[in-house]
């Protein structure tokens, strides 16, 4: 996977994760172009896009678009399921997730993503294990937090 | 601080610059509490990229956290390491990450494996020594760790499938267990067991089973099982199915499985879900070359997809059609593609599709020339200026060189002229520049073919083009060049001169040159006819690439005290050797004409030869500028080999006739469809099925073939000039004006030196059989003793020139019933000489033995050595190959095959190590110092020295390196040693060693990128094996 973007229906970026080194300017350009193309597509259309030499896989959940860029030989369907699994994880963690959860706790969303995908590859596919890792880290964090207070 | 950092991340995401906070992110990761550290690391991984300078500051933090006893801290450090880590710093953390592979917590092991995967991606050679540990990870009891290790294996196997064939069995067993539901329920996803793991395994199996029947056979069963299990109607099962399909079609085919797979493709294509349909089309595209009937089965679906509202589906369908194009359906398919192109706005798609259309139009015959011209016109106007430049080049070459029949050539050219004249009548402002260039060239060259057309008329129309402000200078040059071809009559000349006069004072030198040339040629009719003959669009020009006609000029200049010419690299070296800082820009010291020439038109043969064959004597400053900054040539350098092709036959079957029977039967099964679609289908799928689609080129006759070019093997530098009106013709023109027509003998002089002396095969006939120990033994059964005797004797058969050199032992490569092959490496100073001994071990004679070797990584002389006869038992011939490693790699594989008249081909392969290509480089310490500073690529690593009890560790290590790797020890100064070596292609690598506390710090530097990396790997091995 090359990168993952989350953006709202209004085209506001909510989360971005790049697995390939690119300059900020390029990142901005790609984001702008992609958000435009994806938002212009109708709901009945295919979730896959050919864009430059990449494949874009996107899916809409409520008001949020999840959008991944993969290489040509990668499997599009499994990428769609990666998106879905990530949404499931967020859902489980936040308890029926909504856009606001991600806006206000976006660092948490990043932590979950880092536990699930590492360097662009699926790291841990067991839902239980991912959440356990996150909870452990959170727990320790809380304890230390209280201790310092 | 934590809150502020989170906000900074947010700002950055919204597109505001927040680079001031980067350093604070690193500080936070360094100093904060665990809570803050986590945010700090996150911020770092989001803000910075791999080569960011600030990342160096993070290395120490990461090192500290990796050693921490707190699990969470270790996790965080590993996470950040596997996301961004500077390449040069990998050696620092590598041992720590390696240790983590044996950690008791699976999450740590998993992350460590992924971190190593990341290291492998950015610096493969640095993790080569831990491949064994990957195997351990593969056998880990935790499925998560095992899954992670598959990422590495996928990459490794992609690079060299051969070395991992032995793991096939393990992969198949794992897949069986997964499919059989043996994993914990945690890993299920929508009740499918570990889909990610399954797909990874399927991909690996595809790589392993590709073109390998034996390995493929091992996996048939489990593939069948996977197909059978994947029956629930959910995306994830389809994802697995799709991967299965790909694997089945990649590995050695088995008809039963293919049948099942074909059915599955049907499921995809016929699915109402659009995503699945897309994948179905993709799968069809993938398999259609193997099995064109599949496309026939789904033709109605394909037609529907062609009119689909989603452009992505359309695009994929066109891709599929492109694969099934043949001589009969090409016009319909091209039309569909052009329709799509007219609607598409995406630049990337346009470039890609335009290229494909052009390829199809050139490749397939079509009864009408006009179709070809029209299609090309459409391509030029749609593709415009974004398309690949070789499309117009190829088109013009096709027109200029012509085909096999003169009449057809004439007709085609005339058609082109006609269509362009009518195009010029209309509004030309919307036409792309490239198209205008093509138009003006064609009109300049061929408008004389049209009877009743006044050249003056054409000149006037072309002149109108120039009035448009929007056209570029490059196009203007093309137009002027066309005009100078046209001014045969006084009327036309008058008009052309009027136009040209405007440009004689133009600021752009290329344009001005063109205009001045036009004027000059107009005045001198004789010269004009000599330089620009009317039918001169396809003549062979001899270009004196050695520039010998300038020799007089150069020697004059030298006599007047000018400095001799030095090539740019030599100058660069000299500059870098001066240790004083140079504040002047380097660019200015280069002769302007040289940099302009080699940068602007790389394709110009004159510029090429200029930069390649400059003799040391030639001084460029002061040489008259012969090569202007002219537009690119319509013709590429003619070094590309001419294709010899058979004469073509005209091919024009009607569509109805060509409708094969198989289609008609398919049609009858389809229920009433509307007439239009059927027609479309019949025209699209005509010629499919019964014909062999896999090789369309072979089955259809090609009309548009290039003529066989006259070839003169002794003359490498010959170049073809399509037209004498473009830039290299202008150099020829100047040559003519100077009255210094190159003498052909100069040419052959210069080329004879250039003939590469790389490969030569020497045949040493072994005539003295009596000396062989086995000569007296029973001939019917060659005993092993005989062979051993033979082997020890083989080196004596090497030619005298190689006898004194260092060589390896003779090893046996393979042996068949009658031939036995052995090889020996001889380490010559400038190449590795591979000697292959072919010995006859049967008692009959063997006829026509030929031996051929090839290698992907090495430069191998491309030739086949043939020996007419090996007449008697133990008759030996030697075939010698001089191998040179151009691009360094840790090892290189040489494959070869031996065939003889009576027997099956025997093939063999031989792995050569980088060490075989390394030679010592004798240097003095000063020379070493100078070179060290001038090399740009370096690698550093610490190696563990195993033997602590040794007195002088450095000396022992240096000796080991010297013996194993053939290095030259330049000097030993205290605890530091310096060594030098070179690759046989002549490129040096310098080593600097330093011991401290049981570690050997090695620092390698070289002018080429991969050499230090690869050599380091061998140093590691040498030290470990010691």
Image (cartoon, coloured by chain):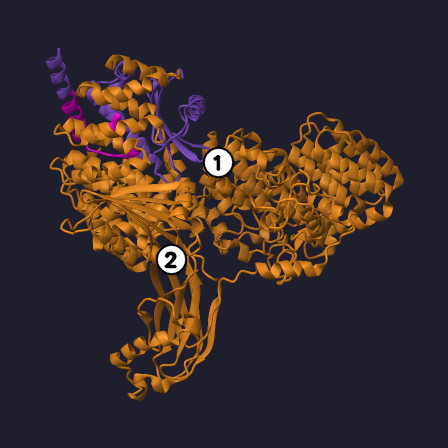
Chain colours: A purple, B orange
Q: Position of residue B293 (x, y in %)?
A: 44, 51
Residue B680 position (above or below residue B855): above
- Label 1 crowd (10 A; few <14 / some 14-19 / many >=20): many
For marks 2 and 1 on the same chain, the one whose residue lies earlier in the sequence: 1
Instruction: Tell me which chain the residue with mark 1 is part of.
Output: B
Give the secondary structure at mark 2.
helix
Residue B1006 position (above or below residue A39): below
Residue B682 in the magenta stretch? The answer is no
Instruction: Tell me which chain the residue with mark 2 is part of.
Output: B
Give the secondary structure at mark 1.
helix
> What's the magenta bit mostly, secondary-structure-wise?
helix
Q: Residue at x 40, y 54 (%)?
A: B983
Mark 1 and mark 2 in contact (Cβ < 8 Å)? no
Q: Quadrant of residue A54?
A: top left
Q: Which residues are magenta?
A: A113-138
Which quadrant does the N terminus of chain B fall into?
Answer: top left
Residue B465 position (above or below residue B357): above
Which one is nearer the viewer's eye here, A121 or B1001? B1001
User: Of the residues tagged 2 and 1, which is closer to the observer?
Assistant: 2
Q: Position of residue B847 (x, y in %)?
A: 44, 79
């Amino acid at each position: 996977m090359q990168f993952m973007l989350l953006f709202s229906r209004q085209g506001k970026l909510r989360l971005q994760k790049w697995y390939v080194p690119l300059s900020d300017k390029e990142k901005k350009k790609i984001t702008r172009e992609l958000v435009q193309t994806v938002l212009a597509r109708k709901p009945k259309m295919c979730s896959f896009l050919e864009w430059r030499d990449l494949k874009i896989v996107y899916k809409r959940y409520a008001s949020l678009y999840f959008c991944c860029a993969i290489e040509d030989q990668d499997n599009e369907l499994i990428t769609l399921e990666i998106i879905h699994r990530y949404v499931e994880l967020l859902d489980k963690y936040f308890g029926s997730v909504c856009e606001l959860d991600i806006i206000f706790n976006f660092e948490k969303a990043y932590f979950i993503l880092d536990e699930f995908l590492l360097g662009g590859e699926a790291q841990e596919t067991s839902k239980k294990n991912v959440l356990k890792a996150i909870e452990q880290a959170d727990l320790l964090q809380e304890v230390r937090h209280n201790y310092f207070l | 601080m934590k809150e502020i950092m989170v906000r900074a991340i947010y700002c950055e995401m919204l597109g505001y610059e927040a680079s001031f906070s980067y350093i604070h992110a690193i500080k936070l990761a360094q100093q904060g509490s665990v809570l803050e550290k986590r945010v700090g690391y996150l911020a770092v991984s989001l803000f910075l990229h791999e080569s960011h300078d600030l990342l160096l500051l993070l290395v120490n933090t990461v090192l500290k956290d990796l050693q921490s006893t707190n699990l969470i801290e270790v996790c965080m450090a590993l996470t950040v390491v596997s996301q961004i880590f500077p390449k040069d710093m990998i050696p620092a953390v590598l041992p720590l990450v390696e240790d983590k592979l044996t950690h008791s917590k699976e999450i740590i092991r998993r992350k460590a494996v992924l971190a190593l995967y990341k290291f492998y991606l950015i610096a493969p050679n640095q993790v080569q020594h831990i491949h064994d540990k990957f195997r351990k990870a593969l056998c880990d009891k935790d499925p998560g760790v095992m899954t992670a290790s598959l990422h590495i294996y996928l990459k490794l196997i992609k690079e060299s499938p051969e070395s991992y064939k032995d793991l096939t069995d393990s992969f198949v067993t794992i897949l069986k267990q997964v499919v059989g539901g043996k994993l914990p329920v945690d890993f299920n996803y929508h009740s499918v067991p570990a889909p990610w793991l399954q797909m990874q395994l399927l991909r690996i199996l595809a790589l392993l089973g590709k073109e390998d029947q034996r390995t493929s056979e091992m996996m048939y069963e489990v593939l069948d099982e996977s197909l059978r299990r994947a029956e629930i109607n959910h995306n994830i099962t389809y994802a697995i199915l799709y991967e299965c399909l790909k694997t089945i079609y990649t590995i050695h085919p088995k008809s039963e499985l293919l049948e099942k797979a074909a059915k599955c493709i049907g499921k995809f294509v016929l699915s109402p879900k659009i995503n699945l349909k897309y994948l179905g089309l993709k799968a069809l595209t993938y398999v259609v070359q193997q099995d064109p009937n599949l496309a026939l089965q789904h033709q109605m679906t394909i037609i529907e997809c062609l009119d689909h509202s989603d452009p992505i589906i359309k695009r994929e369908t066109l891709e599929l059609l492109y694969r099934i194009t043949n001589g009969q359906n090409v016009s319909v398919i091209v039309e569909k593609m052009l329709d799509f192109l007219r609607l598409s706005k995406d630049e990337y798609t346009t470039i890609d599709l335009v290229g494909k259309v052009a390829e199809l139009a050139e490749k397939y015959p079509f009864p009408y020339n006009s179709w070809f011209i029209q299609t090309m016109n459409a391509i030029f106007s749609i593709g415009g200026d974004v398309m690949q430049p070789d499309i117009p080049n190829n088109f013009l070459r096709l027109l200029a060189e012509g085909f096999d029949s003169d009449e057809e050539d004439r007709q085609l050219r005339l058609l082109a002229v006609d269509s362009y004249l009518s195009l010029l009548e209309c509004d030309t402002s919307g036409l792309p520049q490239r198209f205008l260039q093509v138009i003006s060239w064609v009109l300049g060259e061929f408008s004389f073919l049209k009877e009743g057309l006044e050249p003056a008329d054409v000149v006037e129309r072309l002149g109108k083009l120039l009035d448009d402000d929007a056209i570029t200078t490059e196009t203007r040059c093309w137009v002027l060049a066309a005009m100078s071809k046209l001014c045969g009559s006084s009327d036309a000349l008058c008009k052309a001169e009027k136009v040209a006069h405007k440009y004689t004072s133009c600021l752009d030198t290329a344009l001005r040159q063109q205009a001045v040339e036009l004027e000059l040629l107009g005045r001198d009719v004789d010269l004009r006819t000599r330089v620009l003959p009317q039918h001169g669009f396809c003549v062979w020009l001899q270009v004196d690439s050695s520039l010998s006609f300038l020799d007089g000029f150069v020697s004059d200049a030298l006599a007047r005290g000018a400095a001799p010419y030095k090539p740019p690299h030599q100058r660069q070296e000299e500059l870098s050797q001066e240790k004083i800082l140079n504040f002047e820009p380097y660019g200015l010291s280069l002769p302007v004409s040289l940099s302009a020439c080699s940068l602007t038109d790389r394709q110009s043969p004159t510029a090429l030869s200029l930069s390649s064959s400059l003799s040391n004597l030639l001084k460029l400053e002061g040489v008259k500028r012969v090569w202007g900054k002219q537009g690119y040539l319509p013709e590429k350098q003619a070094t590309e080999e001419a294709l010899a092709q058979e004469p073509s036959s005209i091919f024009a079957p009607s569509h109805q006739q060509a409708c094969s029977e198989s289609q008609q039967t398919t049609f009858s099964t389809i229920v009433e469809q509307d007439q239009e679609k059927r027609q479309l289908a019949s025209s699209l799928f005509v010629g499919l099925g019964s014909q062999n689609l896999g090789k369309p080129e072979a089955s259809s006759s090609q009309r548009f073939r290039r003529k066989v070019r006259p070839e003169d093997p002794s003359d490498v530098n010959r170049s073809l000039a399509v037209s004498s009106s473009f830039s290299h013709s202008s150099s020829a023109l100047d040559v003519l004006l100077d009255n210094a027509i190159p003498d052909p003998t100069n040419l052959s002089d210069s080329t004879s030196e250039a003939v590469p002396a790389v490969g030569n095969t020497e045949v040493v006939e072994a005539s003295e059989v009596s000396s062989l120990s086995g000569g007296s033994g029973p001939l019917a059964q060659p005993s092993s003793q005989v062979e051993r005797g033979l082997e020890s004797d083989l080196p004596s058969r090497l030619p005298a020139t190689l006898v004194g050199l260092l060589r390896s032992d003779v090893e046996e490569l393979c042996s068949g019933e009658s031939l036995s092959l052995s090889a020996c490496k001889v380490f010559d100073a400038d190449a590795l000489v591979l000697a292959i001994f072919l010995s006859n071990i049967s008692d009959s004679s063997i006829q026509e033995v030929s031996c051929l070797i090839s290698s992907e990584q090495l430069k191998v002389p491309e030739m086949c050595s043939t020996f007419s006869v090996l007449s008697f038992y133990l008759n030996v011939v030697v075939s010698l190959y001089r191998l040179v490693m151009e691009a360094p790699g840790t090892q290189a594989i040489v494959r070869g095959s031996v065939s003889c008249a009576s027997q099956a081909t025997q093939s063999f392969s031989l792995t050569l190590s980088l060490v075989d290509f390394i030679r010592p480089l004798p240097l003095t310490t000063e020379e070493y110092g100078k070179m060290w500073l001038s090399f740009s690529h370096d690698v550093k690593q610490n190696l563990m020295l195993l033997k602590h009890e040794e007195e002088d560790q450095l000396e022992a290590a240096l000796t080991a390196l010297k013996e194993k790797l053939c290095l030259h020890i330049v000097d030993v100064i205290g605890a530091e040693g310096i060594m030098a070596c070179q690759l046989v292609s002549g490129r040096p690598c310098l080593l600097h060693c330093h011991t401290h506390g049981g570690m050997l710090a090695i620092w390698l530097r070289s002018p080429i990128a991969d050499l230090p990396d690869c050599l380091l790997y061998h140093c590691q091995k040498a030290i470990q094996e010691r």
